[in-house]
Each structure stands twice: as structure tokens, then as C-alpha cells.
Image (spheres, rainbow, N blue to C red):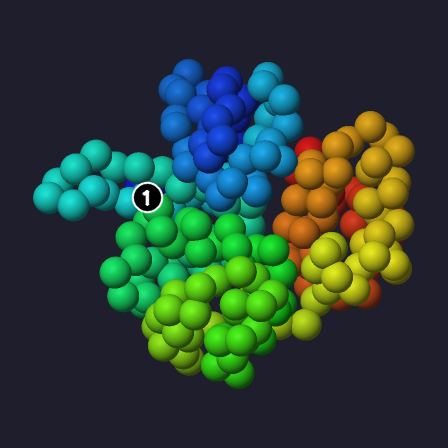
Amino acid sequence: MIAFLRGTIIEKGPGSVVLEAGGVGYEIHLTASAASALSPEGSTAEFFISESTGMYGGAVSLYGFATRSDRELFLSIKDNVPSTGAKKALEHLDKASRSLPEFVKAVREQDPVRLCAVLGFTRKTAEKLLAGLKDKIDGSLPAGRPSLGEGARTGPLARAGEALASLGYKPAEWRAALEAVSRDLEDPDAGVEELVRRALRRL
């Protein structure tokens, strides 16, 4: 079973990447936002991997995530929400990742309005997600850290973004890197220097 891959980006698509690792090219499916934030071809990238086998003995597909918590949420959605395969779970994760704290809060509070109004889910999908994920979101997924789309327009995250932008990184690149860093950081009060240092590892 493949759990993690680090290698060179050979080819990028709107929802996937071909990663060369150990002389083998792996096609990895990504959320649309993660795919748009990929570094140029020839750069090094790394992903936590989830394998999914097609129905009736189909081929194995690889799904890639920047963090363990993203992979855990993907698996929670895929395994607990009715009629949700890997591709649909990836689409739901893409919307949830717009503001993971809002998504987690909505699930914990069973609030379909928040899922629809803030993250763009339809009412029917929101109700399916809430029913399937009730009591499935644990403490490993952050509920209170700011996302770059909201309260982080000021403070360390915003200043870290400005620093990365000054180094020539595109907004989609540094935003995705800082979102991943902020979700994984054990210290929610990390300073700008620490945020930039960790983000650069992902760029």
C-alpha cells in the first residue's frame, strides 16, 4: 500500500499530477484547488496518499493530499457519507478546504445553513454530509484556526503571505502552502518566521 510519495512533477492537469518517484511515474488525483497551486513541472512535491480501487475489481487510483488531516477528512467523507465514492469525496473536500474551520464547526453543530452559505454545498449534499459525519470529526481536525480567506487578512498568516509573495510565489501557491501549514501546526501562535520556513518546504 502506498501511503506517501515524494518526487518530481512531470506533468500537471486540472485535477491531477504525474509524479516521478524512484523511476516510476504515478498519476495522483488532487482537489482542483491543490492542483492549481502546484509548483512548476520539474519541481519537487510530496503527498500523503490514499488508494482507491474501482468497483468490480477495477484499477487502483491514487489520491494525494498536502497534509494527514486532509487525507483523514477525505476518508471520513468517503467512508461515512452515503453514495460517496472517492471522486465525489475529493469534490466535497475541495469545497470544505475553502475554510476547514467553518466546515468542522458546521459538522459539529449540525448546521446545514453554514455549509450552504459559506462553502457552497447544496442543501441536499449538506444534509448528507452532516448525517454521515455526525460524531466522526475528532480533535485531530482543527475547528478554530483562521483560514487565509477570512480572519487571517491581518496577523502572522497575512504577513507570512506577504513575505512569500515578495519572494515571487503566486497567490495560489503561497495560500495553499500556508493553509496546509496552519492546519498542521501544533502551535496556533507561531510567528511569521516559523510560518514562512514551513511554507517554503511545501513550495
Q: How many marks?
A: 1
> Can you identify the residue that label 1 sits on?
51
Residue nearest the viewer, comparing 49 with 104:
104
**Where does residue 21 sit, x and y in percent of width and height?**
46, 24
Quadrant for the N terminus, please: top left
- Residue at image position (32%, 67%) is 80
Q: Is residue 191 left or right of residue 108?
A: right
Where residue 165 appears, as percent x and y from the top left, is: 84, 36
Amino acid under label 1? Glu
Identified at 50% across, 18% down, the residue is 10
Residue extending furthest toward the bottom: 109
The image quarter in which residue 2 lies: top left
Identify whether 109 is placed above or below 25: below
Residue 83 vertical position relative to residue 49 in the rendered view, above or below: below
Query: Which residue is rendered at x = 53% and y = 75% of the image?
Result: 113
In the rendered structure, the answer to whether residue 181 lies left or right of residue 124 reads right
Question: How far across and down, in percent of the image, does residue 187 sit?
Answer: 74, 64
Query: Callout 1: 10 Å neighbours few (<14), some, many (20+)?
Result: some
Is 163 placed left or right of 181 in the picture? right
Q: Nearer the viewer, residue 184 or 52?
A: 52
- At 57% across and 55% down in the image, what residue appears? 97
Front one among 44 and 106 = 106
Query: Does residue 153 appear in this view?
Result: yes
